[in-house]
């Protein structure tokens, strides 16, 4: 009986130590609270989660990326996780691309980006000179346009296993007038795409609610498990991160 109990305790301990970790990165002018619904779903699915709160309006993308991501990686590794995944909303995806451009995450697993401005946003192009825009959105917000000088266009192809969820519904019809359709009110579907991505799925959800809707959460969990999305709106691409060593 004592031997059996010890075996069970060791098994439970091993399973706890072996859990994958998921880092959550919120978007511009948001907080970790925006990702709490997603965090709870990930915890319920058996992942360790690290929901990062970072001062998105106070610094540039170059400063925010290590500020947000390095401590989160340390937290995951302290939990002895074997693999570290990322789930990001909006600018959070740009922070991860910026970080991986200059740092290797050897234990990086899969990444899901929700509404990422991977090619920038025409909303920034049109509003960046409007009084109050920079004061509210900060240095990073001013870097998210679509010009060759803006941060998204300066970042190269992704080298990790990436799935992108793009919204096609808008609650801000004014901002949508600046964007190619379809869009989510902040980013067009076309501008969420990036070279090297593995999968794309569109959902009829607006930008501020992507991380809260159950249909999006279901897609996130599916991609973290399988490296693909599901449903009629899902697309799969031949991405380098999913190729076998012989084909890569």
Image (cartoon, rainbow, N blue to C red):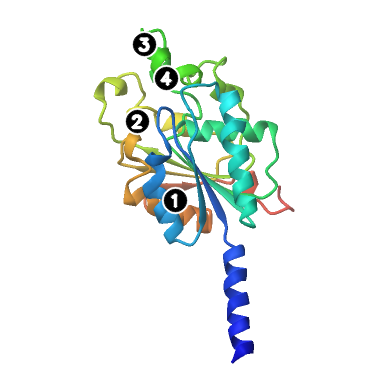
Crowding at dot 3, Cα within 10 Å, few <14 / some 14-19 / many 20+, comes out as few
User: Quick one: label 2 or label 4, which is nearer the N terminus?
Assistant: 4
Q: Position of residue 131 (x, y in %)?
A: 36, 7
- Foreground mark, 2 or 4, reads 4
Crowd band around label 4 with a 10 angstrom C-alpha radius: few (<14), some (14–19), many (20+): some
Q: Residue at x 55, y 32 (%)?
A: 95
Question: What's the mark number on residue 220?
Answer: 1
Rendered image quadrant of residue 42 = bottom left
**Is 56 in front, or is 27?**
56
Q: Name the front one of labels 3 and 1.
A: 3
The answer to whether residue 233 of the structure is visible from this angle is no
Q: Which mark is residue 132?
A: 3
Number of disc labels: 4
Q: CA distance from mark 1 to mark 4?
A: 27 Å
Residue at 42% across, 13% down: 134
Alpha carbons under labels 2 and 4: distance apart: 20 Å
* Pointer 2 or 1: first along the chain: 2
**Can residue 143 be seen by looking at this rendering?**
yes
Mark 2 and mark 1 in contact? Answer it, CB < 8 Å.
Answer: no
User: Which residue appears at 34% of the width and 18% of the height?
Assistant: 178
Mark 1 or 4 closer to N-term? 4
Q: Which residue is mark 4?
A: 137
**Distance (Cα) linking label 3 and label 4:** 9 Å
* Mark 3 vs mark 1, CA separation in Å: 35 Å
Tell me the SS state at disc 2. Answer: loop
> For the residues marked 3 and 2, what is the alpha-carbon distance in whole angstroms?
24 Å
Of badges 3 and 2, the one in the foreground is 3
Q: Is residue 246 left or right of residue 182?
A: right
Residue at numbered disc 2: 183
Q: Residue at x 50, y 17 (%)?
A: 139
Whole-percent x, y for residue 108 in the image = 63, 48
């Amino acid at each position: 009986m004592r031997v059996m109990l010890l075996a069970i305790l060791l098994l439970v301990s091993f399973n706890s130590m072996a859990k994958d970790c998921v880092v959550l990165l919120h978007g511009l002018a948001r907080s970790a609270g925006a990702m709490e619904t997603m965090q709870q779903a990930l915890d319920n699915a058996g992942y360790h989660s690290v929901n990062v709160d970072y001062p998105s309006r106070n610094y540039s993308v170059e400063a925010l990326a290590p500020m947000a991501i390095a401590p989160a990686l340390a937290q995951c590794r302290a939990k002895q996780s074997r693999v570290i995944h990322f789930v990001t909303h909006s600018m959070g995806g740009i922070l991860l691309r910026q970080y991986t451009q200059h740092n290797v995450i050897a234990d990086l697993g899969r990444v899901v980006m929700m509404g990422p401005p991977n090619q920038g946003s025409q909303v920034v192009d049109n509003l960046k000179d409007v009084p109050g825009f920079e004061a509210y959105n900060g240095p990073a917000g001013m870097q998210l346009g679509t010009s060759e000088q803006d941060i998204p266009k300066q970042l190269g192809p992704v080298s990790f296993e990436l799935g992108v969820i793009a919204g096609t519904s808008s609650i801000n019809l004014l901002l949508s007038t600046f964007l190619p359709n379809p869009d989510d009110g902040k980013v067009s579907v076309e501008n969420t795409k990036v070279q090297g991505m593995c999968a794309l799925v569109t959902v009829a959800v607006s930008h501020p609610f992507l991380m809260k809707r159950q249909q999006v959460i279901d897609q996130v969990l599916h991609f973290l498990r399988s490296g693909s999305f599901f449903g009629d709106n899902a697309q799969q691409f031949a991405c380098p991160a999913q190729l076998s060593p012989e084909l890569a």
